[in-house]
Amino acid sequence: MKQLNKLQTVLYILGGCLMVAGAGCFAAMFFRPFACWLFLLGAVLFTAMQAQQRYLGTDITIRRLKRLQTFSGLLFVVSGMLMTDNVSGWARALVANQETYIQLIYNKWVLLLLIAALLQLYTTHRIDHELKKNSKNT
């Protein structure tokens, strides 16, 4: 696994912290217009730095897990976009009526965030386990 340099590591950790702070403030209804953008910025930083951490080996299991991790990062970004929609309502123009908007888009960021977080948790632990197993075999 390609390691991140110091700047990338700092951005990766900063992105994760911004995501936690943004989601916490947004859920606690503390300055929501700022918190949603804080989360989105953190999600973009986190996902971009995680994408820089490439797997250079040939193990198909780790490659699959990295693809799942990338998908999870994209879910974080979409979750942040939906969070900003809760404040600004930019997606209301994309659907026919208010009822459809509420059924399809409104507050769905919570579900996407939960799915992304569970996928991140799973892939992080499985990749670590697979890398340790591969290093013992060689």
Image (spheres, helix red, strand yellow):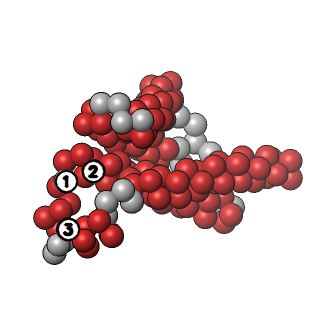
Camera-side residue: 117 or 33?
Answer: 33
How many other residues sit within 10 Å of disc 3, few (<14), some (14-19) or many (≥20)? Answer: few
Left or right: where 44 falls relative to 54: left
Contact, mark 2 vs mark 1 (Cβ under 8 Å): yes
Please provide percent x and percent y for residue 40: 34, 42
**Which residue bears the numbered disc 2?**
86
Q: Most extreme residue toward the left, as rendered?
A: 93
Left or right: where 124 falls relative to 84: right
Please provide percent x and percent y for residue 68: 55, 61
Q: CA distance from mark 2 to mark 1?
A: 6 Å
Disc marking residue 89: 1
**Which residue bears the numbered disc 3?**
98
Q: Secondary structure at mark 2?
A: helix
Left or right: where 36 falls relative to 127: left
* Amino acid on which disc 1 is placed: Gly
Q: Secondary structure at mark 1?
A: loop
* Amino acid on which disc 2 is placed: Asn
Visible residue check, residue 51: yes
Which quadrant, please, contains the N terminus? top right
The mark lying in front, picked from 3 and 2, is 3
* Amino acid on which disc 3 is placed: Gln
Instruction: Name the image quarter holding residue 59.
Output: bottom right
Mark 3 or 2 closer to N-term? 2
